[in-house]
Amino acid sequence: MPQRALIEQRPWLLASLVAGISYWFVADSAIPGLWLILWKGAGVALLGIYAWAHHPVRDAHRIALVMALGALGDMILEVNFTGGALAFFAGHMVAIALYFRHRRADLDTQDKRTAVALLIGIPALSFGLTGKPEVTFYALALGGMAAAAWSSDLPRLRVGLGAVMFAVSDLLIFARMGPMATSAVPHLLVWPLYYFGQFLITVGVVGALRRKGEFAAA
């Protein structure tokens, strides 16, 4: 889409990209804490506004709720890790319900194996990295979200890939609690994997709903 068309037709999406990308560069700056927290939440919050404002059907509003809970989690994490995780947990539950509404009818053997690997592997890796039962409990929802996205009929190179990117981002956070505590890799990759994962999920869901004709029927 040409830049002018993006600005005119998708201003919330463009604003999200500006906020999400710029946050990566200012995350370690001397900007006062409250403003930096709001900046962190803005990228994904604007994805939610994009989905809600321009696409008046329930499934678009459901993905908007997922993004709203994600943005809330982003901000709460800065002051309370458990509270932020609970917001993300709730978002994963909403996302799983949405993806189940769009189950793929013709999953082949490899797709099923991949979904099972995500469902079981993500919490198993989370426990291996942290040894914390509460992290593993959260990771059950994370793995369920990724597996449900992969198993849906929504575009896999957007929604499925975005969900896996989100999961990898969280796994890097867990690795930072243990074996990668002194590594720069999580610091560099957590935010871009997370933000662009959420971006791909949002545009993938909205694009799929449009192709299915749901907006025309709204």
Image (cartoon, rainbow, N blue to C red):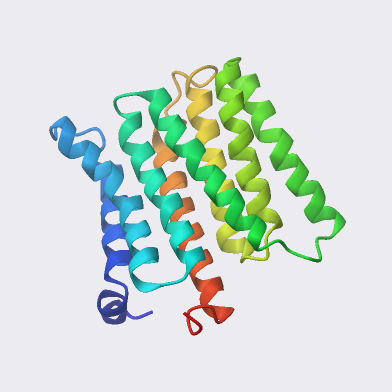
Q: Residue furthest right?
A: 109
In depth, the one of 39 and 186 nearer the eye is 39
Quarter of the image for the N terminus: give it: bottom left
The answer to which quarter of the image holds residue 28 is top left
Looking at the picture, how far across and down is residue 141, in whole percent?
60, 37
Count of labels shown? 0
Looking at the picture, how far across and down is residue 146, in whole percent?
62, 46
Residue at left 49%, top 85%? Answer: 216
Residue at left 82%, top 54%? Answer: 110
Residue at left 29%, top 65%? Answer: 12
- Residue 154 is left or right of residue 43, and the answer is right
Q: Residue furthest bottom?
A: 216
Looking at the picture, how far across and down is residue 2, in whole percent?
33, 81
In depth, the one of 86 and 208 nearer the eye is 86
Residue at left 59%, top 78%? Answer: 212
Looking at the picture, how far across and down is residue 34, in whole percent?
17, 34
Q: Is residue 81 above or below residue 141?
A: above
Q: Is residue 60 above or below residue 134?
A: below
Q: Is residue 34 above or below residue 155?
A: above
